[in-house]
Amino acid sequence: MSHKPTTPVAFIFPGQGAQHPRMAAGLYGFDETFTTWMDMGFRLMAEDGPRLRRQWLAEAPSPMYDDVSVAQPLLYMVNHALGRMLFDWGVTPVAMLGHSVGEFAAATLAGVLDFAEGMRLIRDRVEHFADTPPGGMLAVAAGVEEISDLLGGKVALAAVNARRQLLLAGDRDSLAEASRALDARGIVNRDVAARQAFHSPLVDGAVRAGLPGFRRVRLNLPRLKVYSAYTQDVLSDGEAVDPEFWASQAARTVYFAPTLDTLLDDVDCVLLEAGPGDGLSRLARRQPQVLAGRSSVMSLLPDRWRGDEVDRRSAAAARSLLCPGPVLTGAGGTGV
């Protein structure tokens, strides 16, 4: 038995960099819906499924955990499975917003594409990105205007996550040079958990290689409202069914903060980080609409895996706040 939320809820989904060992693993084998969708994802990964599952559940991550071959499918699967779990609780979001691969998960939940097709496209991405030049990403505590002279050439603006929190992307040598320049200016910066230069020209070749796959997929009009961090607005019907729009995202700048600002101007709501960790929640708490008390922020899971029971308690606490009333567990002992 589910009780619908009394306050509008918007889902936000994280992307590359949010991955961590055993993310959401406490719900695996515990919540029936989450488990079913994760198992489906592993099956759809074919021969790579068992390896991916082992890497996800290992307490000590492999050296490849932050590589596109592991992080991208796992983030897509975990975001999607958590969204399905929330749907089964009776939580229908008034809007969804994802960061990078998180937008792909939001689009899947909105019905733009089928999960099986999404997994096939993720497998294609893994294959194409394996051939991209080695690169990475750099988090920078500054505004765009402060570091604009470092952009262009081999360093790209990968994401605007907050007014003074950016991501840069590029090859390792160029990022190291940019980091030294930032250090000299007293600007805090750090490496991000990524082995590819997402959202930069370094991955243009992989984007072109992936376009035929998107053209073969059936794309549908969204059944739920999705805000795109690439256009900084509501996903239009034309964008939803445009293969080039989706294929190009991996090379384009993510404007998360401006898009979240648009969403919160449109609706007062509970912003629920419906993916692993609480990185987007921490960013969202800086938004003027949240600081003014018009909207609030909640994380479904802790900042990192702290034990299976912590995952379960965190999800149960979120459910009790979102869906007040008694929870009846069904067959299989689902307790969330």
Image (cartoon, rainbow, N blue to C red):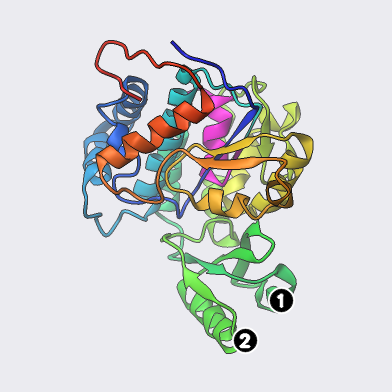
User: Which residue occupies the foreground of this view, 284 or 97?
Assistant: 284
Numbered badge on residue 123: none
Q: Is residue 11 magenta?
A: no
Q: Is residue 142 left or right of residue 109?
A: right
Q: Quadrant of the C terminus?
A: top left
Circles 1 and 2: CB atoms closer than 8 Å: yes
Looking at the image, which residue is at 28% across and 36% down? Answer: 26
- Badge 1 or badge 2: first in the primary sequence: 1
For badge 1, the amino acid type reads Glu
> Whole-Å distance between the Cαs marked 1 and 2?
10 Å
The correct choice, above or below, for 267 with respect to 173 in the image is above
How far across and down, in percent of the image, does residue 230 sit?
68, 46
How far across and down, in percent of the image, does residue 195 sit?
41, 61
Looking at the image, which residue is at 51% across and 17% down? Answer: 90
Stretch of the chain drawn in magenta: 97-116
User: Which residue occupies the foreground of this view, 80 or 279?
Assistant: 279
The correct choice, above or below, for 174 with respect to 243 in the image is below
* Quarter of the image where one finds residue 270: top right
Q: Which residue is mark 2?
A: 185
Numbered badge on residue 146: 1
- Give SS at disc 1: helix
* Quarter of the image where one finds residue 262: top right
User: Which residue occupies the foreground of this view, 262 or 201?
Assistant: 262
Residue at the farthest bottom position: 184
Q: Is residue 57 left or right of residue 31?
A: left
Q: Is residue 105 magenta?
A: yes
For badge 2, the amino acid type reads Arg
How far across and down, in percent of the image, does residue 140 sit?
58, 70
Graded by Cα atoms within 10 Å as few (under 14), some (14 to 19) or many (20 or more), the crowding at tag 2 reads few
The correct choice, above or below, for 322 with respect to 254 in the image is above
